[in-house]
Amino acid sequence: MTEIDALRREKEELESRYGPWTAHNVRLAEGLYTIAPEPTGDEVKLRRIVQLVSDLCGRIEGLRVLDLACLEGMYALEFARRGADVVAIEGREANIEKARFAARALGLDVDFQLGDVRELRRERHGEFDVVLCLGILYHLDADDVVAMVDEIRAVARNVAIFDTSVALARGETRRYGDLELQGEILLEHASGSTTEEKQGRLWSSLDNPRSFLPSLPSLLRLLRHSGFPTVVQAHLPAEPTQPRGRVTLVALARDPIQPLLTPEPGTDAIPERRLPRRRPGAWRAAVPRRLRRFARRSLRP
């Protein structure tokens, strides 16, 4: 039996126990992929994230990277392949076992940990040059969203990347002292779902029945409140299939610049409530183009 045949058999045994790969299409060996030889779509986001980190940090080799809710491990594996020291946390056994198998097949050393990302702590996990929070915030309840961003700031010593969905409506409000968050409530699990059923829903939360999806302005306020003075949105590398309401934000773990030459206060003194509360340009998506044109003509003098 060849090495590829042995890998293929191990992969089949893994899939018979945990089911097929659901998202991360990784090339394990010549002609052997976790999903298929054809691109599945996630490769576009992988290029975006890797390029961002490389450009922001000037390198990848030697960086300490944390991948939160790593799913089947594609991002962790790619950064490890490029020389990063990677810790990846995932809450479902099915996903972590697939990730560990892929690491063995590729001969990569990744610290894949089965655990709850809500238990991230600086004293337990240490500090990281780069923290990847990709597709997990919108699976958490409001209290956990706030706590998670605070903990990410505590462990990040350079860059944190948040790839997440944001609410396009503001039906719910949550307040944490002087911090106000607006967004939507999402259903994760039906009432009465068993632990086994929740574990089997690989694209849902671990256990919370509902999650809180903050609006983009609310998420920006939260990031500022947690201590990220600079947050920018990535547009390139492009992700043409990125759905409306999905953003990639780069938050820099720095100290605010102060004092300035001018008599005005530094940006750290600007109240959080003065950050925008409406998603820029959202009205354009909500109002048909023909109606916008009619309104402009009607308002002309």
Image (cartoon, grey):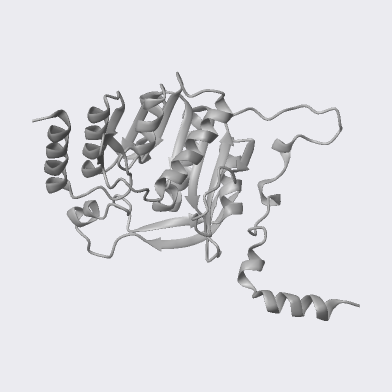
Please say whether residue 177 is visible from this viewpoint.
no
Instruction: In this rendered view, identify the residue nearer to me: 256 or 162.
Output: 162
Figure check: 278 above or below 20: below
Q: At 73% across and 37% down in the image, what residue appears?
A: 267
Instruction: In this rendered view, identify the residue nearer to me: 248 or 89.
Output: 248
Residue 14: x and y in percent read: 15, 42
- Quadrant in which the N terminus is drawn: top left
Q: At 37% across and 48% down in the image, what residue appears?
A: 39
Figure check: 11 above or below 275: above
The total of numbered circles placed on residues is 0
- Quadrant in which the C terminus is drawn: bottom right
Q: At 44% across and 40% down in the image, what residue appears?
A: 46
Classify residue 55 by image quadrant. Answer: top right
Residue 45: x and y in percent read: 46, 44
Horizontally, residue 17 falls left or right of residue 131, namely: left
Q: At 30% across and 45% down in the image, what residue appears?
A: 37
Figure check: 51 above or below 207: above
Residue 285: x and y in percent read: 61, 67
